Image (spheres, rainbow, N blue to C red):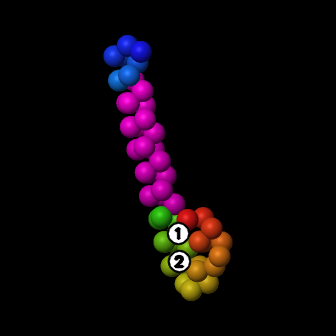
Amino acid sequence: MSQDNASQLTNSSKSMGRKISSLTRRIDLLKGDRNLTYGHRARSPYTYAIQ
């Protein structure tokens, strides 16, 4: 494998990690909204299954 391919792979994996982290952040925000909206009812087995 050439140096170019290797660097492209690491760059793409980095961007994937960034995308995943932003996704998890968004999910955390959604979970927070749900907790605010439903209060204690949000602590259902479903919310734990999402985690």
User: Neighbour class for label 2 at 10 Å: few (<14), some, many (≥20)?
Assistant: some
Q: Quadrant of residue 50?
A: bottom right
Start and end of the magenta stretch? 8-27
User: Of all residues shown, which one is farthest toward the top?
Assistant: 2
Location of the C terminus by quadrant is bottom right
Q: Secondary structure at mark 2?
A: helix
Q: Which residue was labeled with disc 1?
A: 31
x and y, in percent, of residue 19 in the image: 45, 44
Look at the magenta stretch and give its main secondary structure: helix
Is 32 a magenta residue?
no
Left or right of residue 14, residue 50 in this image: right
Residue name at image x 35 percent, y 24 percent: 7
Left or right of residue 42, residue 26 in this image: left
How far separated are the C-alphas under marks 1 and 2? 6 Å
Left or right of residue 18, residue 33 in this image: right
Residue 35's tag is 2
Whether residue 3 is visible, yes or no, is yes
Is 9 a magenta residue?
yes
Residue name at image x 65 percent, y 76 percent: 45
Above or below — where is 48 with respect to 23? Answer: below
Camera-side residue: 37 or 10? 10
Above or below — where is 15 with respect to 22? Answer: above
Q: Secondary structure at mark 1?
A: helix
x and y, in percent, of residue 39 in the image: 55, 84
x and y, in percent, of residue 44 in the image: 63, 79
Q: Are marks 1 and 2 in contact (CB under 8 Å)?
A: yes
